[in-house]
Structures are given as structure tokens and as C-alpha cells.
Image (spheres, grey):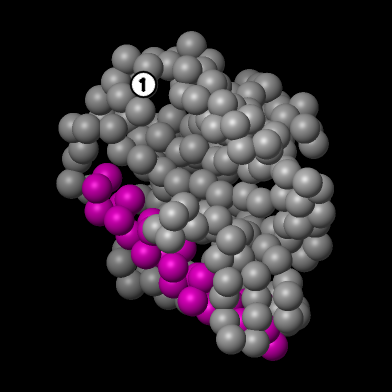
Amino acid sequence: MEPGMTTLELDQIGRKVLEDSGARSAPEFCYQFPGATCISVNEEIAHGIPSARVICGGDLINIDVSAEKDGFFADTGASFAVPPVKPKIDRLCRDGKRALWVGLNQVKAGEPLSKIGSAVGAFAQKNRYTLVANLASHGVGRSLHEEPAELSTWPDPSEKRIMADGLVFTVEPFLSLGATWAEGGDDAWTLYADPKAPTVQYEHTVVATRNGPVILTLPDGRA
């Protein structure tokens, strides 16, 4: 990824990676999303449509990749800052990764699902960030979105469910410099930060076991 590329060109690279792996785009397959990947730029924070939009220096890009292979689904995503990067954005990206791992480290069979949101919320508050409170994690496995649905990655007193042994789901907090909500725009897909503020998302698919989390979407052992 570099300045001068379009998000459509970036999406075409993602499509080739999926095809070369014998996988197919889950949002395209399941929901007829107009692209192989979701690519969101700056004010867009989720479900951005690949297009002729040109990537520029200083942009904040989120790439969300969901795939299906042999009847099984997985979901992952990450945010990237295009140089030159402002210090506050560099810190936001660093802490977005930390927030994800704070959540992942709460995953263990027999524990309350609410521990994830509580831990991420405490991290965000301590470091003076906000969390987008209407973009939730979700179950994944035989379909892209399945039970348990609407898993909060923010403090949620109403969350009473327990992590069952073998439960497969995503952890994907949206950490922001001020946004607390995602609002729709002119198309049926793209979501925007409200209030407008830089926002990052990092995501893994994880299995809850008695020994803790097993993370399925680590690329070559890296976060």
C-alpha cells in the first residue's frame, strides 16, 4: 500500500490473495458486498467500498478481510497509517493493537463475555480514548455472522452470556480519538465516525478454550 494507489487496486490485490488460497470473499459471497474486502479511509470507519479513491500520504486506512474456505469462515482486520504519520495517529494505531490484545487476553471458556468489553473499556478510559459502541464483535464459523451475536467490546452491564468451550467469535474494538457511534452515509454500506474523529479497528477470530484463547487469524505468528 502506497500513495497514488486506489482503494480498488488494493482490493484487487486482496482478491488475488484470497483466490490463490482457494478462498472467497465472505461479504461478497454472503451479502453481495461490492468488493472482495472492505476498505475504509479516514472519515470512513467500516464497510468502505473499494473505488477510484486515491490513497494519499497521511491517510488512515482500515482493511477488513472476511473469507470462506471449505464451508468455514474467518474474519480479521487492521488499520494502517500512510506516511507521513502524525504522532497522535501513530499512537492511536499502536494503542488500537494493544486494545485488541487486552480483549483477546480475556478469552477463556467458562468466563463471562462481558470481561472483554470491561477490559477494553478500562484500557480506553485510562488512555483517554473513546470506543464506538454500535460496532460489535460476533460469532463466526459456519457463517460469517452467527451466534453469539452483538458481542460488546465496550463495558456492557446487560451482557450476561458465558464463553462456552470451543466458542468461535471475533474480537474487534473500534478505538477512537473521540467517536462513540457509527453512522451510515449515502450508500448502503459505508459507516462514518460520529462525531468525526480518527478511529482504528484491529480484529482477530478466536476460539475460547479452557486454557485461554486460540487465535485463528494470526499471519505467520504475528499480530
Whether residue 16 is situated above or below residue 147 in the rendered picture: above
Q: Which residue sits at x=49%, y=76%?
A: 105
Whether residue 172 is situated above or below residue 190 in the rendered picture: below
In reply to whether residue 147 is colored magenta, the answer given is: no
> Where is residue 155 drawn, in percent x and y?
56, 72
Q: Can residue 121 be seen in this view?
A: no
Residue 1: quarter of image: top left
Q: Which residue sits at x=58%, y=86%?
A: 211
> Where is residue 220 drawn, in percent x and y?
44, 55
Whether residue 161 is situated above or below residue 35 in the rendered picture: below
Q: Which residue sits at x=76%, y=57%?
A: 141
Magenta segment: 89-118
Q: Mark 1 points at which residue?
A: 55
Query: Left or right: 27 with respect to 179?
Result: right
Q: Which of 145 and 178 is in front in this view?
A: 145
In reply to whether residue 110 is colored magenta, the answer given is: yes
> Where is residue 167 drawn, in percent x and y?
73, 72
